[in-house]
């Protein structure tokens, strides 16, 4: 059996980036693979997407988005998150992370926002 070489893969906006080249996830006959895509088209698409997001972000109701995300949590996770935010005196850091989905990391807890 042939041994595969280790490579660094960065995931950004749903694309895999390997040595500066963009790949998208695909499948053929049920087997997943990475398909090379035009770097300039992807970068233009990302640039356009960021401009659209900048234009629309002021009209986004963050409270509604977070409420919808939180209400989908199982009761055990909801109780854990509530406990961490309101009952524990320990400091926590909240960050929004982006990758194949958007989520928010609150301490060690990860709240999925977009799947």
Image: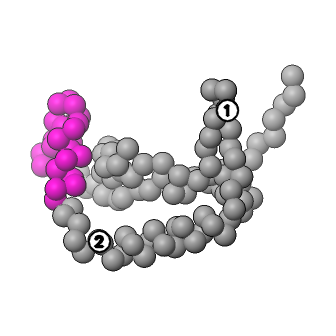
Q: Position of residue 66 (x, y in %)?
A: 21, 53
Q: Earlier in the sequence, mark 1 or mark 2?
A: 1
Q: Is residue 37 left or right of residue 4?
A: left
Q: Position of residue 80 (x, y in %)?
A: 21, 37
The circle drawn on residue 63 is none
Residue at disc 2, secondary structure: helix
Q: Which residue is mark 1?
A: 28
What residue is shown at x 51% (from left), y 57% (from top)? 13
What residue is shown at x 30% (from left), y 45% (from top)? 111
Q: Main secondary structure of the magenta part?
A: helix
Q: Quadrant of the C terminus?
A: top left
CA distance for labels 1 and 2? 37 Å
Q: Is residue 19 left or right of residue 50?
A: right
Q: Is residue 87 left or right of residue 58?
A: left
What residue is shown at x 68% (from left), y 38% (from top)? 33
Looking at this view, is 110 or 83 the one in front? 110
User: Which residues make up the magenta segment?
Assistant: 63-87
């Amino acid at each position: 059996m042939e041994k595969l070489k280790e490579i660094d893969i960065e995931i950004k906006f749903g694309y895999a980036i390997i040595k500066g080249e963009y790949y998208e996830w695909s499948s053929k006959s049920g087997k997943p693979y990475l398909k090379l895509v035009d770097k300039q088209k992807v970068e233009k698409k990302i640039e356009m997407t960021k401009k659209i997001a900048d234009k629309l972000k002021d009209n986004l109701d963050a409270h509604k988005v977070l409420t919808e995300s939180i209400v989908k949590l199982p009761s055990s996770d909801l109780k854990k998150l509530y406990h961490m935010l309101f009952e524990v005196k320990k400091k926590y850091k909240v960050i929004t992370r982006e990758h194949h989905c958007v989520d928010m990391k609150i301490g060690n807890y990860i709240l999925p926002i977009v799947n």
